[in-house]
Image (cartoon, helix red, strand yellow):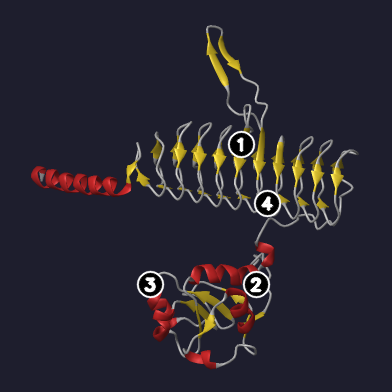
Amino acid sequence: MTAASFFHPVTLSIAEICAHTGASLGNGGSGEKSGDDIFVQMASPIATAISGSITFLDNPKFIDALVETKATAVILEEKHLDKVPSSTIALIHPKPYEAYGKALSLMYPTAMKPMPVTSETGISKQAYVDDTAQVEGDVIIEANAVIGAGASIGRGCHILAGAVIGRDVQIGRNTTIGTNASVSYALLGDNVIVHNGTQIGQDGFGFAIGTDGLGKIPQIGRVIIQDDVEIGANCTIDRGTNGDTIVGQGTKMDNLVHIAHNCVIGRHCMLIAMSGMAGSVTLEDYVVVAAQAGIVGHVTIGAGAQIGGGSGVFNSLKAGEKVLGYPAIPAKTWMKEAAKLRIAAKKDNNKSG
């Protein structure tokens, strides 16, 4: 039998959702009610939502679906209020997607981070915890996890099945380490999420080219991951050569991201799938690196800069700069050049036709 969902929602009243998200009741449909006696039991896409579900509208392309939705409640901007069906409660918010995310975090709390897979509580008898490791209370360490000598695990942490925490690693409180992940030569803060299969603290790629071949350079630094960082599945974060590789507070990484030795990632950056950076790159705060983009070593990407998907960055970028292409150039320039190429190609095709 196929499971309809692996996540079991918490039933919430409309009033609870408004209080948690900051949304306000609109005038559409049943919105004049207080919301205390109206409940939702699930979240659904706007086009397939049924009674008892909550949904949202952020993209105007789905206006037609809004008109036809059967959802009990929809979160949307006030300008779309007149399109809400009479049977649906409108919840007004200037950023509907953000508010929807907050609602889901309350309704589906188990979907917020990797959850224990063995249903064990406390320290599994099948886990290995070195006698010199320090483990605070309310920690779950599942079967086949390994905690090395001198490691420190803070209160409320979850170390999932097969994870390896290396010698002297320090992990803050309420942090989750996913299945088969490994953390070595690293210091992690509070509320960090490391998804399955990610490897933190392995060798940086350091070799000296000589007449005898490639001489290995020992990597003796650390990885420092600050509070509230989330790292996707199968990412790799190399430890520093002499200094440290640092990931700043609140930064989020997609799956399959690579951070090389000595990189310094600022606060609240977004690194999307299969992006990567060579050694000693600095990203200032709020930088976005889109999918499959690559950054050459020893450059600085200014605060708030955005690097488009598939781009190759070979030079430092100023704060707020937006680039595309390989090699990366200003996004507006790239789009103009691409448009000219399309026009030229169309003319050539017409001539040859």
Q: State which tag comes first along the sequence, 2 or 3.
A: 3
Q: Which residue is mark 2?
A: 107
Which element carries disc 1, helix, strand or loop? strand
Residue that appears at 40% across and 84% down: 83
For discs 4 and 2, the disc positioned in front in the rendered view: 4
Residue 219 seen in this snapshot: yes
The answer to whether residue 72 is left or right of residue 86 is right
For discs 1 and 3, the disc positioned in front in the rendered view: 1
Outermost residue toward the top? 211
Question: Residue 315's quadrant in the figure?
Answer: top left
Which element carries disc 4, helix, strand or loop? loop
Question: What is the distance, in whole Å, between disc 4 and disc 2 at their CAs?
Answer: 21 Å
Q: Is residue 300 positioned above or below 291 on the image?
A: above
Q: Label 4 amino acid?
A: Val
Q: Position of residue 172 (x, y in %)?
A: 75, 49
Question: What is the distance, in whole Å, between disc 4 and disc 3 at their CAs?
Answer: 35 Å
Q: State which tag comes first along the sequence, 1 or 2.
A: 2
Q: Position of residue 156 (x, y in %)?
A: 79, 56
Q: Is residue 297 positioned above or below 251 on the image?
A: above
Question: What is the distance, in whole Å, between disc 1 and disc 2 at their CAs?
Answer: 36 Å
In terms of depth relative to the viewer, which is nearer, 248 or 270?
Answer: 248
Q: Which residue is mark 3?
A: 60
Question: What is the distance, in whole Å, between disc 1 and disc 3 at their CAs?
Answer: 42 Å
Outermost residue toward the left? 351
Q: Judge the density around disc 4: few (<14), some (14-19), many (≥20) Cα neighbours within 10 Å.
A: many
Q: Label 3 amino acid?
A: Pro
Question: What is the distance, in whole Å, between disc 2 and disc 3 at their CAs?
Answer: 25 Å
Q: State which tag comes first along the sequence, 1 or 3.
A: 3
Q: Which residue is mark 4?
A: 192
In terms of depth relative to the viewer, which is nearer, 304 or 44?
Answer: 304
In terms of depth relative to the viewer, which is nearer, 239 or 28?
Answer: 239
